[in-house]
Amino acid sequence: MPYCKNCGKEIKPDVRYCPYCGTPEPAATITPTAVTPLIQAPDVIVTTTPAVPGYEVVKTLGLIHGLTVRTRGVGGKIVAGIEGVFGGEVTAYTSECEKARKESLERLVQNARNIGANAVIGVDFETSDVLAGTATIFAAYGTAVIVKPIGKQLN
């Protein structure tokens, strides 16, 4: 099974767009690892798992989050309405949700840096509609920690 060259998720063969991130012509041969970090910033590892393989947690700094609130403009709502009439994926909302997920994750990483963490474990995403459904809150949250490779001294 091929994987998307942008987001790394498994996709069906011969799809024109990745159903997760919307990348055109997404098929790529990727060998997934047992645990793939969500992102590997130069200084912060982010993962959904409760630990980072090959590392040990030396200090827990606490719960952190990244947050963004998004709404569709008039043009996007019209496009989404037209797509909704025909059924299937509403790509106008999918692309906006992907941008919001990425933005909330980037803010999570920045908050981790601000408190001195070099990893965030147990990351999860949450969404909620506000303002009578006209806006959506996207939140990424996890536990900020300091990790070190197993068997190495922390400076």
Image: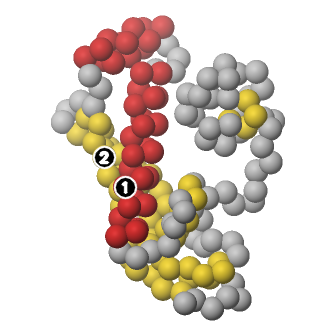
| In the image, residue 121 above or below residue 101 | below
Residue at position x 62%, y 23% from top? 24
- The residue that label 2 is drawn on is 68
* Callout 2 crowding tier (Cα within 10 Å): few <14, some 14–19, many ≥20: some
- Whether residue 54 can be seen here: yes
Which residue is nearer to you in this view: 13 or 129? Answer: 13
Q: Position of residue 135 (x, y in %)?
A: 25, 35
Q: What secondary structure is found at the residue carrying circle 2?
A: strand
Q: Are marks 2 and 1 in contact (CB under 8 Å)?
A: yes
Q: Mark 2 or mark 1: which comes first in sequence? A: 2
Where's residue 25, x and y in %?
67, 23
The residue tagged 1 is 107
Work out which quarter of the rendered image holds the C terminus and state it: bottom right
Residue 24 vertical placement versus 43 (above, below): above
* Residue ID at (43%, 52%): 105
Q: How is the image coloured?
A: secondary structure
Is residue 34 rendered to the left or right of residue 129? right
Instruction: Report the amino acid beneath label 2.
Output: Thr
Residue 96 image offset from top left, x and y in percent? 40, 31
